[in-house]
Amino acid sequence: MTLAGAPTVFVIDDDAGVRASIQGLLKSVGLRSETFGTAQEFLRSKRPDGPSCLVLDVRLPGLNGLDFQRELADAGVQIPIIFITGHGDIPMTVKAMKSGAVEFLTKPFRDQDLLDAIHQALDRDRVTRQQQSKLAELRKRYESLTAREREVMGLVVSGMLNKQIASELGTSEITVKIHRGHVMRKMQAESLAELVRMAAKLELPSGKK
């Protein structure tokens, strides 16, 4: 599936009745879903490459939802999580939300509350994926620069003038201008301000010594 692929809602709950009920609700509003009885089953599954979110029961056999949330974060799996529980308490809710959960719903919850949280989570994932895609494209452009062009870009975005860069690199101002032109073209930057923003997104170190 492409980035624009259909969104998928993953449901992890050890209660088959709850899984079936949520899956039926999602189907009624045209949302695709996959359900799992345990966190391990979810980890073993092959996930489609489209926007997604996770509806996660806090109390699961083998691994509770909050521990699983931390495990996913440690593994670099970025997926928005909506917690559902029959035994919620304030500290648990605070912990889940602080760790980035979209919502924490206590059973029985209103269908609409769950659907609102799911739409919010899918929107969040869409935005994250778009940002990651743009950043990957930016990295690709940066990798197309030669070592000297990267050097010039670093010095340009640190605020140095062409003649200062020429002096720093022991070359002529005209050569710096040529390199700078290549950098602007390859990075597809319309202005110095845009180049500076690109460097910030790429988290490049300043070229100044």
Image (cartoon, rainbow, N blue to C red):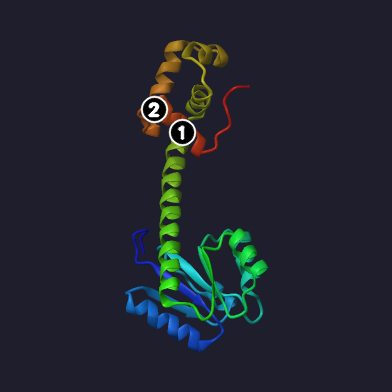
For the residues labelled 2 and 1, say whether their Cβ atoms are less than 8 Å apart. no
- The residue closer to the viewer here, 66 or 143, is 66
- Tag of residue 184: 2
Q: In this figure, what is the number of numbered marks?
A: 2
Q: Between 12 and 207, which is closer to the camera in this rendering?
A: 12
Q: Secondary structure at mark 1?
A: helix
Q: Which of the two discs, 2 and 1, labels the residue nearer the N terminus?
A: 2
At 46% from the left and 11% from the top, the residue drawn is 173
Q: Residue at x 45, y 59 (%)?
A: 125
Q: Is residue 200 above or below residue 47?
A: above
Disc 1 marks which amino acid? Answer: Arg
Q: Residues within 10 Å of mark 1 (few under 14, many from 20)?
A: few
Q: Secondary structure at mark 2?
A: helix
The one nearer the camera, 18 or 126, is 18
Question: Residue 160: x, y in percent?
Answer: 52, 17
Quarter of the rendering containing residue 52: bottom left
User: Are there few (<14), some (14-19), or many (20+) residues within 10 Å of tag 2?
Assistant: some
- Split into 4 quadrants, where in the image is the N terminus? bottom left
Residue 29's label in the rendered image is: none
Residue with the mark numbered 1: 197
Residue at the spot 55% in from the left edge and 11% down from the top edge: 167
Give the x, y percent position of residue 143.
47, 38
Give how far apart the Cα atoms at labels 2 and 1 are: 13 Å
Q: Quadrant of the C terminus?
A: top right
* Residue type of the residue flagged with mark 2: Met
The vertical placement of 106 against 74, above or below, is below
Residue under the point 45% across and 35% down: 198
Q: Quadrant of residue 9?
A: bottom left
Q: Horizontal placement of 36 versus 6: left or right?
A: right
Q: Give coordinates of residue 103: x percent, y percent.
A: 52, 66
